[in-house]
Amino acid sequence: MKAHEVLPAAAPLAGFDHLHAAHCESGVSTALFREVGLDLSEPLVFGIGSGLFFVHLSFLRIMGHPLTSFRSMPGGIFSKAARRLGVQTQRETYRRPEAAMRRLDALLDEGARVGLQVNIFWLPYIPKAMRVHFNGHNLIALERRGDRYLVSDPIMEDLFECPADALERARFSGGPRFLSRGLMYRVLGRQSEPPLEEAVLAGLRETCDRMVRIPRVVPYFAVQGVRHLGRRMPRWPEWYGDRRAAEWLAGIVRMQEEIGTGGAGFRYLFAAFLQEAARSPGGAAAGPFSERMTAIGDRWRAFALQASRLARGRESIGWEALGAQVLELADAEEALFTDLDAALRGMPQLVDSRAVPAGPRDSRDSRAVPESPRDSGAPV
Amino acid sequence: MRDSDVPQDPGAVYEGQLRRVTWAVGEDGAYRGVPSTGWEAEIGATAVSIDRNNERIHEAWEAVRAGRQSPLAYHMAVALLDVGTLATEVRSWGWRVRRHLDPRVWAGLSASWRQAYADVMGLDVHRLDELPDTPELFAGGLAEPPGSEGR
């Protein structure tokens, strides 16, 4: 069957610098922004688009696994980053594959670079072991060459020529219904003076908001989601049996490391963003948090190493200790984002917010009186 | 993580043709993207997933051969699909797809249904009833040490 062939790389295309990125969506966004002369780094786009998040929907099975994600909804990074940076974009979805492919051809003939949302499973140039049914993968179509399309996939080092039927198959795949089929998007233009500082702050604020301000009664998202996972994980073997527990644990590690996250489930990418954010005057408060985020990323990596060993039946620290590690990570992330939020608002930082459970409330009350000079800027 | 600590483990996951970017801290303290050939932890986790998928493919293959299930069960397993996802692919309901796993129902299946399944699996319609002599398993499972994989 088609899914078993592997394609060789294509030669580079003059006039287009292929971006080898950690993550598909921030990579595609970065590359498309560069097409209109907005030259930003991948972490910056990822952070401005508020890409960092955590979800563990323990009740929902996607291909037999509970839905676990270390990032926000697919599509959000591009649309938020574009909005905050003042980039004009166009987004189209299609019901009929023929119409979608005709429109893609028309745009490519005009010389447009078109972002596509596809199912990674049906892309013949992706190594077989990495093919999973995930509909939120992104790539850029560059050129039509007969019955093939030249595509720039940011997680790959080179360009590839993807057969038209495979691309159509990938664009119109089933799967979870919250992802629109046949989605294509492109960048039309930008403001002459992109509001970079405001954009960085908006990205930081939304990430903080979502990580620590979702009410605790909802257990599935952000730091509560991490806790939810940490509490349930040690019970998996008795609830679902050893084999399924091991498979799920392996699935978590794959989501965290393999599916284009830049390492540690986007935590390193976000640490890189914090570092860059600190270089702009308004974002100086974010500086000290980059190293803390890196340390949290290192702990996620340590967890992944043990989890992978446990899933393979090798010697490891065991289920209870793994769950405890995840719970500690939840505490560490809550402390970091609470402090970061306070720092952004010019508030004194809590020394250890774990000791003060009501921590977020202090900064929430201060919301109406922004003290940071950047808060006076126009809403982004 | 320091850039010099970015793992460069050889592994079956990327089949030697792919490096992926991991972000890490350089000597000057600044973050940079570092290409990585793989990491033991994710290669191992992927091997577990591949192993389980291969088990499912093998079970489906045996069930089809024994006449307990229709060939759809095998094609579904090879495409790593489950009933729910396959149902969304053919824009129908899970219970209808599940019925088609019954060999008797499968035998009387309409041409349009068969075409729909053939489109999803990327097969010619007449090949839907075929079962290979041995199941087509994915390489890179737990049994093979990393790097020893054939195509």
Image: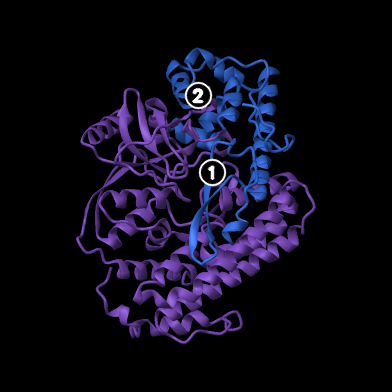
Chain colours: A purple, B blue
**With B41 as the anchor, is A55 left or right in this view?**
left
The image quadrant that residue A14 belongs to is top left
Q: Amino acid at mark 2?
A: Lys
Q: Amino acid at mark 1?
A: Arg
Where is residue A67 shown, x and y percent of the image? 55, 50
Q: Is residue B35 above or below residue B150?
A: below
Where is residue A171 shown, x and y percent of the image? 39, 35
**With A166 as the anchor, is B21 left or right in this view?**
right
Most extreme residue toward the top is: B126
Q: Is residue A62 above or below residue A51?
A: above
Point out the image quarter for the C terminus of chain A: bottom left
Q: Residues within 10 Å of mark 1 (few under 14, many from 20)?
A: some
Where is residue B27 shown, x and y percent of the image? 55, 64
The image quadrant that residue A142 belongs to is top left
- Residue in view at x 69 percent, y 50 percent: A308
* Chain hosting mark 2: A
**Label 2 vs label 1, nearer the camera:** 1
* Chain hosting mark 1: B
- Residue in view at x 56 percent, y 33 percent: A128
Q: Residue B86: which numbered mark, if any?
A: none
Q: Which residue is mark 2?
A: A2
Nearest to the observer: residue A108 or residue A116: A108
Nearest to the observer: residue A334 or residue A27: A27
The image quadrant that residue B55 belongs to is top right
Mark 1: secondary structure: loop
Most extreme residue toward the front is: B27
- Residue in view at x 47 percent, y 69 percent: A214
Cα separation, mark 2 vs mark 1, equals: 23 Å
Nearest to the observer: residue A265 or residue B132: A265
Q: Which residue is mark 1?
A: B19
